Amino acid sequence: MAIPIASHAPPDYDCPFCAVAAGSQSEFTAWRDEHVLVRISLHWDPDFPGHALVFPVAHVENIYTLPDELAGRIARVVRRVAVAMRHGYPCDGVTIRQNNEPAGGQDIWHLHTHVVPCHRGRKWRGSRFRRADDAERGRYAERLRGSLRMIDQIPDRR
Ligand SMILES: [Zn+2]
């Protein structure tokens, strides 16, 4: 069965996530290794602050072309970020979403997974994005960094 490999990036696409990955350590980056990066989102729903994005360091446009091994690495990091948010943020749950192609809600042509801290009584719809305040983004990055370090010290409950 043919796998749909549809690219929507223009030929001269100046990829913002590749720019982040190539740049020096940013105050908004909560964690990274050579394959995967975790960053506090530039845009979020103001009712859901601290929203993070997990994305590969290498440029991959969408999930159709994501190598299995990298998919596994991303999934593990997404899980860790969810656990870290639940421990370190004042949230009651975590939503995870990954969009592919315009019809699937994608608008940045570098695969990324949204990890969104959620609260009882508020439904995250993923459609009300505003530019986040830099100082608040920085505080959430620090909080997530600290929480990721903390869960590293807790034995895994597998
Ligand atoms: Zn890219």
Image (cartoon, helix red, strand yellow):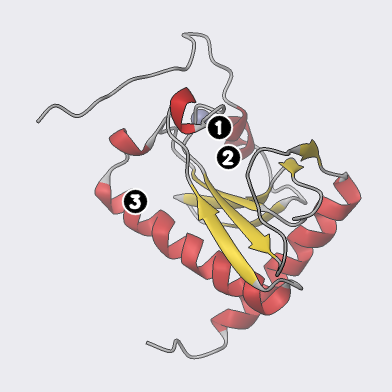
Amino acid carrying label 2: it is: Ala
Tell me where residue 12 appears, x and y as whole percent: 52, 9
Sequence-earlier tag: 3 or 1: 1
Percent of width and height locating residue 44:
74, 45
| Disc 1: CA contacts within 10 A as few (<14), some (14-19) or many (>=20) | some
Q: What element carries label 2?
A: helix
Q: Mark 2 points at which residue?
A: 21
Q: Which residue is drawn at 44% across and 17% down?
A: 8
Q: Image check: 140 left or right of 31? A: right
Q: Disc 1 residue type?
A: Cys
**Left or right side of 140 for 21:** left
Task: Please name which of the two marks, 2 or 3, marks the residue nearer to the observer.
Answer: 3
Q: Which amino acid does label 3 sit on?
A: Ala
Q: Is residue 77 left or right of residue 15?
A: left
- Nearer to us in this view, 19 or 11: 11
Residue to which mark 3 is pinned: 71
Dot 2 beta carbon under 8 Å from ligand 1: yes
How many C-alpha atoms fall within 10 Å of the one at disc 2: few (<14), some, or many (≥20)?
many
Q: Mark 1 points at which residue?
A: 18
Residue sticking out furthest to the top: 11
* Dot 1 beta carbon under 8 Å from ligand 1: yes
Q: How far apart are marks 1 and 2 (CA)?
A: 5 Å
Say if mark 1 contacts mark 2, CB within 8 Å.
yes
